[in-house]
Image: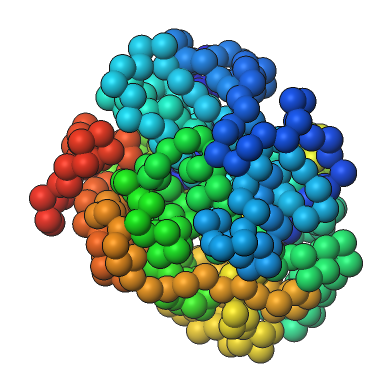
Amino acid sequence: MARTVRSRVAAVAVAAAVLLTTGCTLPPFAPNADREATPGGRQPAGAAAWRPCPEVPRELVGRAAPNMAYDCTTVAVPRDWAVAGGPGAAGSPGPTVGASGADTFEIALIRARSSKQTDRIGSLLVNPGGPGGSGVDTAVYLSFGPAFGGLPDEVTRRFDIVGFDPRGVKRSSPVKCISNADLDASFGYDPDPDTAAEFDGLVRLNERIGKACGDKYGDQLRLFSTEQAARDIDAIRSAVGDEKLTYLGYSYGTLLGATYAQLFPRNVRAMVLDGAVDPKQDAVAGSEGQAKGFETAFRNFTEWCAATPGKCPIAPDARAAVTDALAKGRTSPARGADGREATAGWIFFAVVSSLYTETGWQELAKAIKELEGGDPAGVFELADRYADRDSNGEYSNQFDASMTVNCADQEQRPDREQARTLQEQWRQKYPLFGPPLATGLLSCASWPAPADPYPTGRADGSAPILVVGTTGDPATPYEQTQKLADMLGVGRVLTWEGEGHTAYPQTSCVSAAVNAYLVDLTLPPAGKRCPPA
């Protein structure tokens, strides 16, 4: 059980930056306005009607964390805050708890509260990123404490840990418009479709996905934007009874938090943004940054293999082993027990999945070695973990939500000609990851709904915000850390000289600095750097 919980905590903390590659865009989910109101009826704004929900941790990890109690509720928010006037604005109806209707989305919340809590400060709202990651799941995983990779006791003794599924995600009026078959096709597609026919096939797949989402949701797709979700956060803050927000956001969760800080700067008590996204970069710059970051992480993996051959069965040349596996996946893919073929696409996503944490390197090496012998089980396990695909071939709505949010946020959407040109250019600069990141730009090229871009300015009037960056982060490259801090104007950078995506609470140095800020509002010294271990 300990291993299961620890691995899920690690996975949730790094699941933030989903790659929009090989046409596998995150599809939008549509809210179901016909759901019944929560038992107990409509509650006044700002008064969350919590109910015990021990079944949630049982479903996720088989049990509750020691000394933790779990409660759930929903907050009904306007589908379109611009029409409603925004939380706190004149004429705004404000959030309601337990109400639902055609003009609202229901936002699902969970609260994990320690029986050892003393001197309570308030709630710590958490978001794992994605977009498309479940904050409800994240709060559960983080509640298991430091022995399992969760939050330190110093934090759980002072805060309720509150997670929410953003609009469109999992339990919160979920968007679902991509079929399992199209998701299989997307993940299995060649990550570098070099012939005109292969490239055109990928274009058609993206067009089919976009049409399916447009047919189901129409212009409602724009309502799943980051700015709309950031306004939901202020409704959540009010519903849990906090005068000011204390927030922990990973990866895309940093963009969501930064947007909140710009919209409601005076409502921020403390904010930790770990795995920073630069809000000012466009889709092309963001994709190229990830291509560069994953190439660096893959090079670090191959160097580790060469230096520790006893742990790496594909040493001494791990790059050649992976490249050969991809080539074989294009011509004679191995067949798994479920009948799936381990094509180059599935192999590529197995590689991506393993690079989010250094602990995944040994698992990748083992999977590639087994694939050489004709067994793709390890490759499918890694890829399915990334894709959130179960053993029955069913997908969660993680990628539906991710695509919807990303496309709603993008005002400038690269077209097929630009994607094709970048594919050729990036193949030279980033051989393994450049082409997939370039063709991933097709995800929003034919998106059928208008954009709702988020703001990219200062958070004047906000409390200081702690921005945490990891030097070996493949998904949100370290260079973005200072850029986000500078844009907000109130940012203080904390650097972890480690590997993988996101830093807190990986080491005692990082944990001590973040804990002191969350609890006592004490910022680390300017320029603070934490060693790898």
The residue positioned 83% from the left and 69% from the top of the image is 218
Vertical placement of 242 versus 184: above or below?
above
Q: Where is residue 194, by image quadrant?
A: bottom right
Given residues 91 and 192, the one toward you in this image is: 91
Report the front residue among 387 and 70: 70
Q: Coloring scheme of the render?
A: rainbow
Judging depth in this view, the residue of 484 and 208 nearest the camera is 484
Position in image of residue 202 (x %, y %): 75, 72
In the image, 456: left or right of 39?
left
Counting from the top left corner in percent of width and height, residue 87 is at 55, 56
* Quarter in which the C terminus is drawn: top left
Residue 250 in sight: yes
Q: Is residue 182 above or below residue 203?
A: above
In the image, farthest residue toward the front: 91
Expressed as whole percent of the image width and height from the top left, the position of residue 111 reads 52, 27
In the displayed structure image, the side of residue 435 where residue 530 appears, left or right = left
Left or right side of 265 for 101:
right
Examine the image and state in which quarter residue 10 appears: top left
Residue drawn at 56 percent across, 73 percent down = 453
Answer whether residue 184 is visible to the viewer in this image.
no
Q: In the picture shown, does residue 19 fall above or below 304?
A: below
Residue found at x 21% / y 57%? 492
Identified at 53% across, 75% down, the residue is: 283
